[in-house]
Image: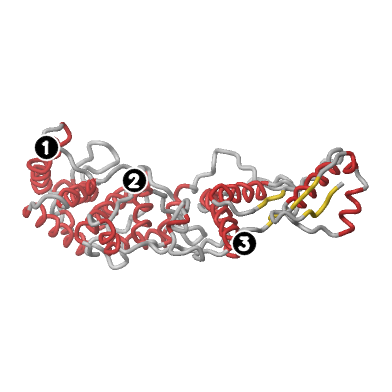
């Protein structure tokens, strides 16, 4: 499994793509986009619904023996807990909160100042929807399913024309949205709404909940972006970051991922960064793409070199400059190809930066190239013969057995 990120993956595997020409060597590092499979295509492939983004085995692929500890716990949740939680949601006012009507709790002094007691009602409803949808994938529970449907419709009706979706700032404190990100947790609530929408989308294969949540995320991306005309800020409670990553995997919408990176890097990095350049540069603010690009580009290069090696199985790859990091990467890529095939690929590193050993290294490199059947210019051979090459006897043949040099 590879983590979905920027160009849809942190890392890539050659067998993920339809053919070897999906990326050509000239496209290395351009960040081509690999399309996200549709939900229906994934269902047809797996036969069990869409794969989820959690690293562990998800509910869809889990089979628990009823008498085991986890099996008994899961049965209890399906038989009792979901219904009990639903009753609590209705009794406390949470269930109807997205109808945007005034509730007595809204006027009550908060138990933990300055956070109102109802502030997390959005998230409480969302978490229940998420859990219910996961259980409904394997068990028929009509009452639970009806409640999920009703809550989804209430959430849709509560959304504001610009996409905003939050109970407190729509009913209680109008006009004060995004004024206290640290304490009022709008982005935290949004994160759980995203998770609920993803679970609902997996279960029903429709956009009834996913569509309004994506509209809310679009508003957040427009509101919190670099630039003087936009707001800068980050939530006081983590949740939306992981949710946005998972939403990006499902939808493939780039700016949703960018919002995550901007939120993470809005505070100055505490780890010094030194770029791999000849001369040191003063520290500069890091963009959200910085780490991801450093992870992707070596993979792009590796695959490009392997594709060239596959197209030209008897090629000689000669280092153009000195023994740099990129040539080390190319050498490793070719080593992988050579180990998989018996063709006469050859990578020749020519490092002559050391003045004491430079001539010897050039001589050894030229001899290695002769062994591979490369015809060298006569001037290069003449210059090489002026060194100590005549101090030993050798006989060099190319792969076809023809003698191309001796001394």
Instruction: Tell me the CA gap for discs 2 and 1.
Output: 33 Å
The residue located at (17%, 35%) in the rendering is 70
- Tag 3 residue: 312
Of 170 and 72, which appears nearest the observer? 72
Instruction: Tell me the CA gap for discs 3 and 2.
Output: 49 Å
Give the mark nearer the N terminus: 3 vs 2: 2
The residue located at (87%, 46%) in the rendering is 407
Packing grade of label 3 (10 A; few <14, some 14-19, many >=20) is few
Quadrant of res 200: bottom left
Q: Are marks 3 and 2 in contact (CB under 8 Å)?
A: no
Give the mark nearer the N terminus: 2 vs 1: 1
| Residue 66 circle label | 1
| Residue 239 circle label | 2
| Residue 321 circle label | none
Where does residue 367 sit, x and y in percent of width and height? Answer: 79, 48
Of 235 and 327, which appears nearest the observer? 327
Q: How many marks?
A: 3
Where does residue 401 sit, x and y in percent of width and height? Answer: 72, 54
Q: Nearer the viewer, mark 1 or mark 3?
A: 3
In the current view of this chain or complex, which residue is farthest to the right?
A: 386
By what rule are the colours in the image chosen?
secondary structure
Quadrant of res 320: bottom right
């Amino acid at each position: 499994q590879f983590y979905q990120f920027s160009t849809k993956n942190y890392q890539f595997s050659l067998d993920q793509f339809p053919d070897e020409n999906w990326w050509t060597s000239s496209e290395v590092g351009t960040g081509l986009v690999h399309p996200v499979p549709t939900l229906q295509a994934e269902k047809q492939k797996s036969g069990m619904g869409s794969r989820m983004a959690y690293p562990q085995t998800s509910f869809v692929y889990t089979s628990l023996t009823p008498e085991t500890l986890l099996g008994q716990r899961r049965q209890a949740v399906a038989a009792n807990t979901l219904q009990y939680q639903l009753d609590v949601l209705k009794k406390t006012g949470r269930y109807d909160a997205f109808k945007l009507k005034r509730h007595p709790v809204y006027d009550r002094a908060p138990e933990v100042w300055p956070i109102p007691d109802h502030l997390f009602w959005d998230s409480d409803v969302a978490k229940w929807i998420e859990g219910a949808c996961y259980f409904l994938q394997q068990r028929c529970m009509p009452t639970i399913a009806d409640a999920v449907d009703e809550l989804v419709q209430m959430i849709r009706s509560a959304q504001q024309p610009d996409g905003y979706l939050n109970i407190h700032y729509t009913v209680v404190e109008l006009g004060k949205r995004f004024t206290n990100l640290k304490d009022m947790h709008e982005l935290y609530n949004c994160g759980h709404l995203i998770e609920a929408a993803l679970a609902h989308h997996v279960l029903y294969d429709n956009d009834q909940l996913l569509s309004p949540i994506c509209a809310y995320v679009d508003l957040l991306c427009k509101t919190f972006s670099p630039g003087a005309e936009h707001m800068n800020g980050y939530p006081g409670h983590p949740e939306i970051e992981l949710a946005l990553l998972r939403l990006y995997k499902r939808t493939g919408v780039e700016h949703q991922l960018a919002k995550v990176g901007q939120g993470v890097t809005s505070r100055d990095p505490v780890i010094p960064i030194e770029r791999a350049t000849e001369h040191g540069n003063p520290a500069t603010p890091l963009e959200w793409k910085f780490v991801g690009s450093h992870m992707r580009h070596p993979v792009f290069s590796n695959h490009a070199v392997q594709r060239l090696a596959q197209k030209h199985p008897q090629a000689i790859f000669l280092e153009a400059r000195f023994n740099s990091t990129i040539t080390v990467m190319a050498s490793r890529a070719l080593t992988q190809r050579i180990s998989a095939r018996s063709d006469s690929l050859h990578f020749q590193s020519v490092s002559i930066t050391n003045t004491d050993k430079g001539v010897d290294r050039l001589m050894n490199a030229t001899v290695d190239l002769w062994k591979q059947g490369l015809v060298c210019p006569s001037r290069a051979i003449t210059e090489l013969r002026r060194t100590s090459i005549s101090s030993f006897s050798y006989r060099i043949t190319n792969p076809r057995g023809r003698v191309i040099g001796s001394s």
